[in-house]
Amino acid sequence: MTAEAWAPVQILLVEDSPADIELTTEALAEARVANDLHVVTDGDAALAYLRREPPYAEEPRPDLVLLDLNLPGKDGRAVLAEAKADPELASIPIVVLTTSAAEADILRSYELHANSYITKPVRFDDFLRTVQSLEDFWLTVVKLPRR
Amino acid sequence: MDDPSTEPSLGIAEPAAPHGDRELGALLARAGLHVRVLDGHGEERYDNGALLVPAAGARESREIRVRDREAHHHLLLELPLADEGGSDPQLRQGRGPGQGHVEVAVDVTDAARGPTTVASAAGGRSEQAASGELGEAGPLANAHAELADLTADNVALRRSNRDLSEFAYIVSHDLAAPLRVISGYVQLLSRRYGDALDERAERWIDWTVDGVERMEELLAGLLTYSRLDSDGVEHRPVDLGVLVADATAALTREGAEALEVRGEGLPLVDGDPSQLGQLFANLLSNAWKFRHPDRDPVVEVSAWWQAPRWRLAVADNGIGIPAEHRARVLRMFGRLHTREEVAGTGVGLAIAQRVVERHGGALTLHDSDLGGTELRFDLPPAHAPTSGGTEAGSDELGEGEPR
């Protein structure tokens, strides 16, 4: 049962830094699992995307959201809180990706029911491993129960 | 227990110098409070001689480490008023029995002058009420005249400390993001364009990544250090035996199997489990990092009761720290060795010292009987002795029974 047998995983990346977006894109390009990456750069757009409000009405429902905590406007914490409070969206797994290892952030994210929390590593190799662990997470936690 | 005939006479009638009064030090000594001021080398700059006053017997011992970045060092001392103050009209005036508090300040530019009163309060009363009733005569009254000024200084200092700690937190947190971009893209260049690069270019990339990682470690250390100030200190009973065992296990997992850690009969202390865990992790890790190439590394943790606190010693048989460099290694990022010799960022001991200070003590460095370095500090016991309940060793400097 190879990863390629699956339909591409729909991933929504919520990230405002162009450098981080491209780095994540490159890491996902080396991923073992076929994936379609969609990117929005602020919190309002992220919620609009998830709710499929215009201009995102035709976009697929993401299988996984990678959410940066520090965003302009409505920040990652607010996105997380609103998404998890919305019965339509609550089942979408959200992984918080952030620079901060601060315990306060971690705590807050868990209180807001992030599915997992990952501090962005400095080394690209580590970043790749992180992305791969996300795939494992996705394959086991997200995809399998649906079949 | 008070024998007035043996008490030193105090120049009560004489007004004290505008700052710092020797009388206050003597007064505190008579109340059983031992105050010492140490400079950055652990050298004693002031001692109010409480342990030398035969009648009192030190109820509480405070060491103040003078550090150049803090102009004033404040500490809150408890005055056991019930009996010790009984024979002393100055301490007794306007107060009932119970606990009183006096906040003293030490001006580091002239530590030898000893402590100055900032504020005082008797048990259960407001500061104003207590100081109003106290403000009559003698050195305490004199000090109260400066109360307003010093309290304002105090508030400003606390604010400045808080700002500094927030600054360190923000800097260390926000600087990590651009670092990740630098490191990520340099590595991505190597990964994707490695074929087009020669050996020298690859070496430069490695060095860039090394530099970024080092910066990240420094920032992580800075963050840890600043959190010691911004997060409060929890007060819980902490079993040092368990803490040392945990720190040993963690160190072993990181490859320090060869380090022999000795630590029998360690006591329960009162403190913050995570900060104290960090303290012992740093000290044991240093014993491993700075082991002597010709000796099997050994570190020994011991404790003895020296009322009213536990004295702790962490001694190793490593390469040691020459006396002239001891002040430096306690500073943030202070290092004696190149990174090629010994890995690390130079924050370990600075953090250790801060943890000890946050628990009301001071960290001092000494030669170890084992041939390396010995670090000594003190921590409060898990169950503070009730007033009058000073246990073994209350009247002497010597060893009580280790638990």
Image (cartoon, coloured by chain):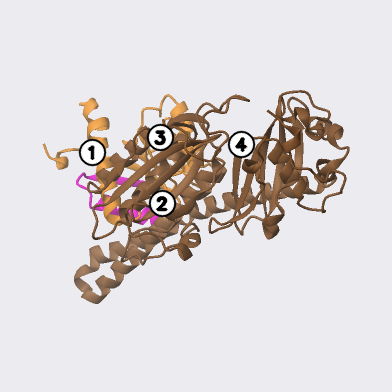
Pick the residue in front: B392 or A59. B392
Q: Residue at x 47, y 50 (%)?
A: B351
The quarter of the image holding the N terminus of chain B is top right
The chain to which mark 2 is attached is: B
Residue type of the residue flagged with mark 1: Asp
- Crowding at mark 3 (Cα within 10 Å: few <14, some 14-19, many 20+): many
Q: Which mark is residue B374?
A: 2
Residue type of the residue flagged with mark 4: Glu
Q: Secondary structure at mark 2?
A: strand
- Residue B106 percent location from the top left of the image: 69, 51
User: Does the stretch in magenta take in B83?
Assistant: no
Q: Which mark is residue B72?
A: none
Q: CA distance from mark 2 to mark 4?
A: 24 Å
- Crowding at mark 4 (Cα within 10 Å: few <14, some 14-19, many 20+): many
- Residue A134 percent location from the top left of the image: 28, 41
Residue type of the residue flagged with mark 3: Leu
Would residue A63 appear left or right of A84 to someone viewing this image?
A: left
Q: CA distance from mark 1 to mark 2?
A: 48 Å
The chain to which mark 3 is attached is: B
* Same chain for the residues under marks 3 and 1 in the image: no
Pick the residue in front: B340 or B47. B47
Q: Colour of chain A?
A: orange
Q: Secondary structure at mark 4?
A: strand
Q: Which residue is mark 1?
A: A136
Residue B88 lies in quadrant: top right
- Crowding at mark 1 (Cα within 10 Å: few <14, some 14-19, many 20+): some
- Residue B395 percent location from the top left of the image: 58, 35
Q: CA distance from mark 3 to mark 1?
A: 40 Å
Query: What residue span does the magenta drawing correspond to?
Result: A19-38
User: Does the stretch in magenta take in A34?
Assistant: yes
User: Which chain gets the brown colouring?
Assistant: B
